[in-house]
Amino acid sequence: MDSNIDINKSILQQHAAKRPKIDKLAENMTAARKPEKAEKPIVALLDGRDCTVEMPVLKDHAVLAFCDATSTCEIHQKVLNEAVGALVWHSITLTKEDLKKFQMLKIIVRIGSSFDNIDIKGAGELGIAVCNIPSYGVDEVADSTMSHILNLYRKTFELAVKVKDGNKYPSIENIKSAASGSVRVRGSHLGIVGLGRVGTAVALRAKAFGFEVSFYDPYIPDGQEKSLAIHRFDNLEELLTKSDCVSLHCTLNEHTHHLINDGAIKRMKKGAFLVNTACGGLLDETAVANALKSGILRGAAMDCLENEPFCLVDSPLYQAPNVICTPNCSWFSDRSCIQVRQEAAHEMLRGLTNKIPDALRNCVNKDFLVPRGLGSLGAAGLLGATGAGTALAANPLVNPGASVANSMYKDQLNGGYPFAAAAAAFNPISQYQAVAAAAALQQMNAAKQQVPLGAASLAQTLPGSAAAAAAAAASMAAASAASNTSVAASGLPNSAVSASIAGNGDTSTLHPTSMAAQLENQPMSRESPKPNSAAASPSPSGIPATNGTNGEA
């Protein structure tokens, strides 16, 4: 019995000696299986210091840094080298040259609705998505607009000032004299210029007060007036002629600058009201002041003037009667300032954790966006020097159903067009690009353009599968056969082909978009982005956009 106990003790001792070794081995194996903790990307607030609102949303996914800069020259080199996302207010301007300084930037979120301080097209060509917060201040601006309208109609502000100044109104005759010019709201005609987010919000509020609401906006599709039960005018002149009060809610550019001038005021009803909570430059202040003095306009209210920050003393409106001016504050409320920062942080989070731009709600440059890191050179490196980056917004690399040739030809990119078409042909990722490249080369030949000699050598650096390259070669050969274009195999890696195109004047009937579009069975046209700058194309009315931003900060 004792011998058995001794044997058992001996076995236990042996196991006890081995156990630490086994535990250590298991520990090492577990540690080896644990993935290394990924380093969080950097998100930088470029022109501010306070990140307290954004931090709770982003802290688990990014490292927040603030720069408090007014230009990219003031931004730390680490941010320029490593920042993946950028939050932007209005104090800094980002041109394409500024954006080139950022090495890893993928997304910019403008904390606000306007994005005039960012080159969205240049950003797209560099593979950087730009987003805004279009819901910012909609309620506040609409409420402020109604407040101005009601003050003009009921003279509330003017009478309150008189009472505060010590004036007394002991009799009905005194009250009638002081309140003379007050107008009944119900049944009055309110004309809205620009039925965007704010314009629509004003229309809904005005209807509740009993206004007969109409609008003019050439960019709104038919049927919107049916949904809101309001009237639509086909031209601005008709709206001005029939409205008792005109409220402006369109964006400012070269076509809408001084939209309300002497000529427009002469078409308005005598004794009409004018309200502007959108942008100061929409109206000619001298013309409005003269109209108020002469009685053509009964009153005017505005939250923004042409030169800001403004002093009313320096404006022609200073000596005009029946004017209400507020200091460009209609967008502000304590709640709106918190909400816009939260929404900007959530948009940034969607960009960091999901696919760009598909996961983004408010990307304003999708039509210009090129994927960053195309081939071994990157999209910007491949196309930036030729000015053809914009063309790849419709490239099969990004959207297989679109055509390289159509976008490049439409934008009239001159020498960059054939260069990009040839380079794209040597890096095919699908049959779509092969077909589109063939169409591009054929259209290029029809336009008597020539591929720069560097295109073929550059193409050698681009990776591509042998099958796709062969497909591209076959497609190009078929296209060139119809136009006497020389295509020769040169033994490049992955069976790629070097093309030497000599446009010899032969014309082709093949539309550059037909092959790729038929392959995808998608519509030819794509909706163009709404203009956000003075470069916008003119409309029949001269009002190119509808989402008034109140010129918000």
Image (cartoon, helix red, strand yellow):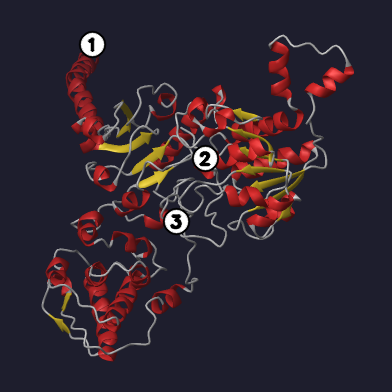
User: Residue furthest toward the right?
Assistant: 172
Residue 406 relative to residue 325: left or right? left
Which residue is label 1 attached to? 2
Residue 497 relative to residue 404: left or right? left
Q: Earlier in the sequence, mark 3 or mark 2?
A: 2
Kindly state the secondary structure of the residue where label 3 is placed. loop
Rate crowding at label 2 as few (under 14), some (14 to 19) or many (20 or more) other CA atoms within 10 Å: many
Under mark 1, the amino acid is Asp
Label 3 vs label 2: CA separation? 17 Å
Under mark 2, the amino acid is Cys
Looking at the image, do the residues carrying marks 2 and 1 touch, with CB atoms under 8 Å apart? no
Q: Earlier in the sequence, mark 3 or mark 1?
A: 1
Q: Quadrant of residue 219?
A: bottom right
Q: Quadrant of residue 152?
A: top right
Residue 408 relative to residue 240: left or right? left
| Image position of 81 with respect to 525: above or below | above
- Residue 71 shows up from this direction: yes
- Residue 33 shows up from this direction: no
Q: Residue at x 56, y 25 (%)?
A: 333
Disc count in the image? 3
Under mark 3, the amino acid is Ala
| Residue 536 disc label | 3
Residue sitting nearer the eye, 294 or 388: 294
Q: Residue at x 47, y 65 (%)?
A: 526
| Residue 279 disc label | 2
| Image position of 400 with respect to 22: above or below | below
Label 3 vs label 1: CA separation? 101 Å
Residue 271 relative to residue 324: left or right? right
| Image position of 275 with respect to 448: above or below | above
* Viewer-side label of 2, 1: 2
